[in-house]
Amino acid sequence: MKVLVCVKRVPFTGGKMVLAPDRKSLETRHLGFTISPHEECGVEEAVRIIEAGGGESVVLTLGPPEAIEQLRDAMALGIDRAIHLQTDGSEWDGQATAAAIVEAIRTEEGSGGFDLIFFGNESADAGGYQVGLRVAHALGRPCATGLKGLKVEGSSLRCEQDTGAGRDVYVLPLPAVVTVKEGLNLPRYPSVPGRMRAARKPVVSSTPARPESRLALAELAVPGGPGRQTKSLGTGPAAAPAVVEMMRDIGVLA
Amino acid sequence: MSVLVLMEDGDPSLQTLTLARAWGDVHTVRMDAIAPFAPDAMAAILERAAADQNATAVFAAGTDRGNDVMARLAARTGLPFAANVVAADPSGTVTRQRWGGSLLETATLSSARLLITAAPYAFRVTAGPEPAPVDVRRYVEELDPRDLVVQVKEHIDPPGGGVSLAEAKVVVSGGRGVGSADGFAIIEDLTRLLGGRVGCSRVVTSAGWRPHSDQVGQTGTKISPELYIACGISGATQHMAGCKGAKKILAINSDPEAPIMSLADYSVVGDLKEVVPAISAEIRKARS
Amino acid sequence: MSGFFLAIALGLSFGLFSRQAVRLYRTVRAGKPTSRIDDLPARARAEAVVVVGQSKLLQRLGPGVMHAAIFWGFIVLFPTIVIAMIGAVDPHATLPWLGAQGWYALLVDVFAVLVLGGVISAYAIRLVQRPKRFAGSHLGEANLILAWIAGIVVSLLAWHSSQIALGLNDFPREWAPVSNLLANAWHGSWVAVLERVAVWTHVLLILGFLVYLPYSKHLHILVAAINVFFTRTRARGRLEAIDFEQPEADVRFGAATAKDLTWKQLLDTMSCTECGRCQDACPAYNTGKELSPKLLIMALRDQVRAQSTAALVPNAVTDNVVWDCVTCGACVRECPVGIEHIDHIVDLRRNLVMVESRFPDEAGTMLRDVDRASNPWGKPQADRAAWADGLDVRVLQPGEPPPEVLFWVGCAPAFDERAKQGARSTAKLLQQASVDFAILGPREACTGDPARRMGDEYTYQRLAKQNVETLNQSKVTKIVTTCPHCFNTIGNEYADFGGRYEVVHHTEFLAQLVREGKLEPAAGGRKITYHDSCYLARHNDVLSAPRELAEASGNAVEMPRHGRRTFCCGAGGARMWMEEKRGRPINEERVREAASTGADTLAVACPFCTVMLDDGVRQTGTKMQVIDLASLLHEAVERKKASPQP
């Protein structure tokens, strides 16, 4: 098997959103960065597939020069080599991202096609829900999304999609594209020899041209708004009667 | 002006309908036009329906399936697509959610036909004229077999049966404050009394205390119960993204400064290990 | 004839002894390097106090006196080996000079009796008292060795007394009261036979002992003195850094097999005599967990002896044993033969974490959070200074002149609600005393201590280097911190990465301000018992300053286990981020001990202890307030201000 995982570098916010002065990006001065959580599971799954059946795994990202850190992180987990589509750090919309990735895949596939390509269901930051599906369409390959279970069965792929009320199962012929969700697996913690080896693994870089955005970011804002009005029901165990009364009021308790 | 809406069961689609009505005459296509579900086929049907109706915009709810089908439609038509929109006008200016709703983005969608999914629970459902269903029979008959390659082959019921986390009327969740896998015993007890489901935050699944299927959040399950009880959960945005569909939120936390204490409808300051058993005891007392 | 026989016995026993001794020496020499030859005066001092002075053994009076009697006895009796050999060959000859000295004969008599007394009390301890610390020890072997020792001194006394009875003694008989007394009982022709049998029995028992020694746990009488010499002299809380710059094949990622142990760790395994003092003091063992520091060292010894190449985990010890340790250092402190158990545990962890990626799942959350968010809570660094809201604390910006004292806050006070109070009180007190101080705010990252003690040396070093760079760029020279873990790491470990600062714990700094009259407390009515943090008291000898503060704030009482013999809260060694799935909770054990003093206030000087013991108080339903000494002092200073001036 030859497997590709596409990942995105995103800040590790710890849940707090602080905007940069231009209001077009997050203030990331004190933030660490990570691979978007769904894609981390994609990396882990790719590594497991190659460990079990042999072959080659490749990680790809479109991002600023610093995104090499995330490529190294993926290689530390066991991915063999990396493709870095370098940007100046500005925002690329889903369509532009997909086009650049498709071109890179076509170049790469001159030396043998990918049997399976992983994407995250959506990136943690932009949440566009589309790059994987656009790439699949351009390559003419089937794609199942939001997977939490995956199994290679000969020349096909059994895919389990979480629906909130159980799982839907798809069976795709290979080669295929999948988008996965956190919960697919529990990604391993990188070993130090793995990290040291990652520093020596090959990375091929190129600088694609950024097309005009058709979903152009104008400004970011932290939602404030009315939100919910919080009512205190008390402190400690003494609050229990007030809680039960509230439950009666809203009708969850007879 | 004519717009097309992809309809599913549930509130998010009704909310989408509210957004669409402000734009013009609404035509609808149902998500179950193809059964079992086949997302490429749905996208193909939408593509033809949109063309035939000359729709200026196609809407769907920002659910898993809604976003999936709309992204496929965007891919096959080469149009841009804005997911999880909270406000939009026909000029193409949209406000959409990033970071699971922790951040809002104002953006311009440059397209003759706007493809948009509406963020769940971002719109209030209002009454309005009944939309006109599109007759899709011909589109279904003329489907390209390649669009049926990706189709649900089988459905697996959730383990243990019963009501799923996404559909539960009451969800009682525990976070880092629960302290251990065993600590969930008191949460499970309260959950049983309320006939609900146990949920948890991301920290809990990473620690291996609960399976990922219990996780509420941006990368877990998005829930919409009548009451969500968050115990020892700080309320990181990625968690709130999963529970904002709840009608009411009760937060129990020893830290009065925890973000969730101002994001919830009700709060109790206190150690969950004391408060949760006290609530269970109070319910039992009331019932006996 | 007898000369010939002795020569054969000597040759044979020394040959067998040397064969095993060389084997052991080669084993130790094959160990991985560790730096243990600096600071010779301190090493000599340790040798004098711990080995010759038997200081650690004498911490327990009964067993201590017993052991000291045997140990000192053998030192005194050593020359009698040569005297007996000469006597065995020629009954009329003795060692020139010493063999004829009355005072020496007296010493021999007295110590022979003391050794016998020692052996009898050792039997009493083992067979009658049966302390728990021997659980898992090889008691049969110990009993054999004790009998052997008894045989050696009994045969010595029998020889001396029969010599006197036969008039063969070169020493004045009145100087040997015990032998003399016994000699009165010897009559008849068989005394001459007794004299021959006794001296030969004595010599052969000793030579046999020499052969048996290197094959038994009693090897400690040879190795312990060497092992004590090579123990850490300073900064007992410091761990040795791994050099990641060298080629990957040369990097020692902790210990996977016995082949990866350092020579000091190999010596440790050979020094252990299974006395169980470590086990008796171990918080994990004492709360019913799998770890026993004694059994750990014994299990490693078995692997070393077998020259095994199998993975130490799980072949020597289980994963649970490795993760049960709180690195409190109680075992290391108690060990009379200088075994450093923490180094073994950390090396096993280093291999599990850095090579195998194997550890309790919940600790993985902490490691990832430390790696990505620079703090184990996974909270945004931008919120680091939020604990000081409303206090007007200066946040040191890059390029600004350094303050006199940098307040290193630590992650727990920055992000944990309960731990915050100690830092707030400290800041208020520093302000009242007009101390020029500042914090780093978002530029302060976790020191890396939890990652390091988990075994993730790689992540630790990244953070350590980052913090050293920040501190050095800011030209910081003096640091005060409320966290003993930060205190230990920055003070003892950052020097390895170019960070040299004067680091003081906030209790020391505040006590100094009180002594200088810059803070004036008035003691109140609280009954306070102070819980020593392991990383303050045991690892770093900070004992008096916290007590000064407790006494300045109220009526201070001590817990049974205090000072350097304190009992852990359960959070050390990154246990703060692991579930306590086995045994009883350590924090509850400690809270019950605190409650037994009748105190209403449990004073702490560590944010981790604050959280753990506060949990313990809630879980046990104890009526006691857990509070940082800084908050107590602040209360006392406010009390003084409020009281009418005379």
Image (cartoon, coloured by chain):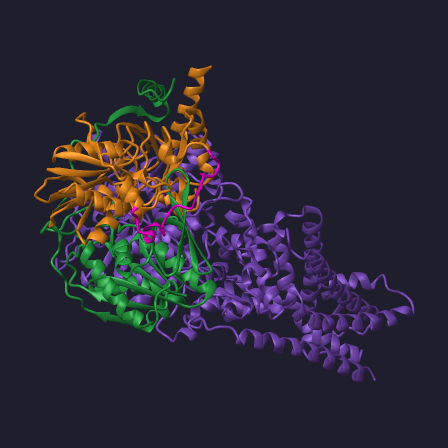
Chain colours: A green, B orange, C purple
Residue C28 visible to the viewer: yes
Depth check: give the residue in front, C551 or B255.
B255
User: Predominant secondary structure in magenta?
Assistant: loop
The mark tally for this picture is: 0
Whole-percent x, y for residue C449 in the image: 36, 56
Asked whether, in this view, residue A213 is left or right of residue C604, the answer is left
Q: From what the image shows, is residue C427 above or below residue A225? A: below
Residue visible at 62% across and 53% down in the picture = C63
Whole-percent x, y for residue C256 in the image: 50, 65
Residue visible at 62% across and 76% down in the picture = C23
The image quadrant that residue C417 belongs to is top left
B153 falls in the magenta region: yes
A89 falls in the magenta region: no
Depth check: give the residue in front, C109 or B140.
B140
Whole-percent x, y for residue C105 in the image: 70, 68
Q: From what the image shows, is residue B242 above or below residue C92? A: above
Q: Which image quarter is the N terminus of chain A in?
A: bottom left
Residue visible at 72% across and 82% down in the picture = C11
Asked whether, in this view, residue C488 is left or right of residue C213, the answer is left
Q: Which residues are magenta?
A: B142-161
Residue C406 visible to the viewer: no
Whole-percent x, y for residue B234 in the image: 30, 38
Q: Which image quarter is the C terminus of chain A in?
A: top left
Depth check: give the residue in front, C504 or B98.
B98
Residue at the left extreme, as displayed: B91
Depth check: give the residue in front, C193 or B91.
B91
